[in-house]
Amino acid sequence: MADLLIELFSEEIPARMQANAADALKKLMTDGLVEAGLTYAHAAAFATPRRLVLALQGLSEHSPRLTEERRGPKVGAPEQAIEGFLRGAGVAREALEIRDDKKGQVYIATIVTEGRAAPVIVAEVLERAIRNFPWPKSMRWGSGSLRWVRPLHSILCILSREDGAEVVPLDVDGIVAGNQTRGHRFMAPDAFSVSSFEDYAAKLKRAFVLLDPAERADHIWNEASQMAFAAGLELVEDRGLLSEVAGLVEWPVVLMGRIEERFLDLPPEVLQTSMREHQKFFSVRDPKSGQIVAFVTVANRATVDHGATILAGNQKVLAARLSDAKFFWDNDLRVVLEKGLEAMGAGLSDVTFHNKLGSQADRVARIEALAREIAPLVGADADQVALAAKVAKADLRSEMVGEFPELQGLMGSYYARAAGLPEDVARACVEHYQPLGPSDSVPSAPVSVALALADKLDTLTGFWAIDEKPTGSKDPYALRRAALGVIRLVFGNGVRVSFKGIIQLHKDIVVLDIIAGKHFADEQAAALREARTQLSRARAVSNLNVNAISAAEAAVRKLESDASTTVHEVRAALQLLLNLEADLLTFFHDRLKVHLRDQGIRHDVIDACLAMPGNDDLTLLVKRAEALSAFLKTADGENLLQGFKRANNILSQAEAKDGVEYSFGPDPKLAETDAERALFTALDQAEAAISPAMQAEDFGAAMQAMAGLRAPIDAFFEAVQINAENQILRRNRLNLLHRIREICLQVADLTRVEG
């Protein structure tokens, strides 16, 4: 057995590519070696800014000798077929063996593949890996044809054994493999030889290179945390930045500096974003005030002045960056204080949201209309929600968000407070974007919840209306994320709403906006916008489809004499979109299935609940699914399901055979056995308990009442013959099975549950 060490030494590899590159080197090499017949015990890959490293332990010395028997053509086959077989097998005619087969005698070739030495295989696999390495971007340099992320300078490739190390013979475009590497670019640039991975890692460390990125990250975090603690401050956690900075240095030297007093009135998020994005600095805050007051930078070398010169240069550059941020902040505040936050957002009419969905101002108007409808459903004040909708997108026109788009919403909340708007409105400016992902928090303030739902539902309804739905893995407008956000908002706040009605209501507004923008001149658009306003105030959700068509027709009836084509287009567009809410609700259900499966609820249980009335009330739907899932995990639930399926199967077969539906009430007077009479009694008791429980949406109580049917149903099937010769008894018993089915189906569609 031998240990393999590979180092590919180059110019600086971008930090974002290093982890994937290390994994790719490990996969390409291990897959290639195993495919060639070698085995190994352990593999580990590492990356620094200038090197990719792979260390394998316990690599076999040779690939095994393989013997394969290959069946050829029949004896007496055409000479051309035999010659072709010989060429394919790589054997001579006299090496063929004749054997008896079921269909006669055939030629058999025995192919022996001798094992190969590990150095030969390693060289072959490594060269292939280098030439076909999956860099996101690569380059050529000099006059060679080799492509690498940055110019590749050297290849270290050795096999280590107890008796010494062997260099693997390899030449890739003039780069000859050896046993030498170099340390830190500035602190230890001279070449040195290595004999094993342990020797390599130890000498690199003495040459000011920490090979393991996890070790570099831990060193940076520990040093920075201790510096901050010593100053009475605390380091702001930023794991993403930590990983990136660890990929920028081979010998991390942590330095801490102070932010100038004139910048301390900037919002903490502005300071943190500016330092992270432009300088790759960590933020350090005062735990008492929460203000960012200092920063941590990581140099790639130690200096005789202990980093003073490096720190001074960084502070100078940082001051320039923060001067820009302060300029944006001061300008934005001046606009807000002098003209108001709505004035800042006045330019949204010039910002296109989507060429088929109008401007950001059009979208704000739609969101406001929908948010007013949602407000009473979540206990929010409709006027406050409308105000929040008007100003929530205003910061998109601010200079600060223009520089740092990731601060949208957050800056809006600061500007809203500066303008003296209510705190709930200020919170809604930032919280209406939430949740942004599975780990993001869900807002709970009623104004924020109403606006967040309206924002996401407008996005979904709008893109559904213009037929821009997610397809396969493509979701350019993040509509799946928006739907999951709606689901989490509903569950997190116990919102009870008919989504079909809400979608239907907003669809009418969106469609009229689309038609107004696409087909009509200013005068006609104004008429349709008036119709949209009337629709936004409507409360009769169940009739909104009819109202939408009527309103659209009325809005253009005055223009029929010279715009008949336009009227036709309006009617056609509205008719085509009548089923939009059903299609979008199906999309919600698909997202909900994914969400609930992650929580351990089976797909068939979800389908059983989706088949029930009220499935557009997502809170009710989940409540039912959770209760059914818990019930089916019990012995009573599992056995009752089997009893239900048996009853349903017998009944369905009988109805199909007889061509009738056995739904007439069974007569307990015709019961012949105690088991039959006991089932009648149990069904009466269950129905008396299930019906009020379902009305009260107490699914747990309904399931418990249904569990009481398990024993009577089991006993009934044991003691009673359903298809009796007496047709009166047979009909009565089939009607009894129908009653079992109907009572159970009140809770969920158990026909969709597997098992």
Image (spheres, rainbow, N blue to C red):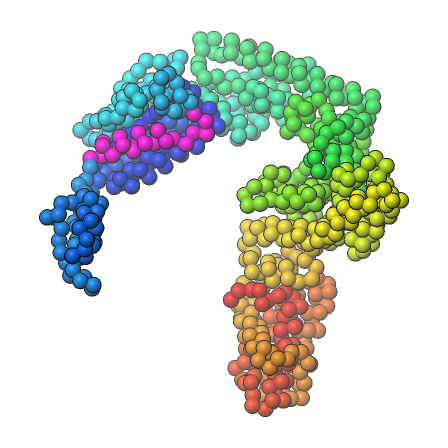
Q: Say which of 424 and 397 sits in front.
A: 397
Residue sitting at x 56%, y 90%: 725
Q: From the viewer's perspective, is residue 209 above or below residue 120?
A: above
Q: Quadrant of the N terminus?
A: top left
Can residue 448 be seen by looking at this rendering? Answer: no
Position of residue 271 measured from the top left corner of the image (x, y, whole percent) = 64, 22
Position of residue 441 measured from the top left corner of the image (x, y, whole percent) = 64, 40
The quadrant where residue 523 appears? top right
Residue sitting at x 66%, y 14%: 323
Residue sitting at x 59%, y 11%: 316
Which region is colored magenta? 117-138
Position of residue 168 measured from the top left corner of the image (x, y, whole percent) = 24, 27
Left or right, 407 with reference to 533: left
Magenta stretch: dominant SS? helix
Q: Is residue 629 magenta?
A: no
Position of residue 722 measured from the top left corner of the image (x, y, whole percent) = 56, 84
Left or right, 495 with reference to 521: left
Q: Residue furthest bottom?
A: 726
Q: Say which of 704 and 722 sits in front.
A: 722
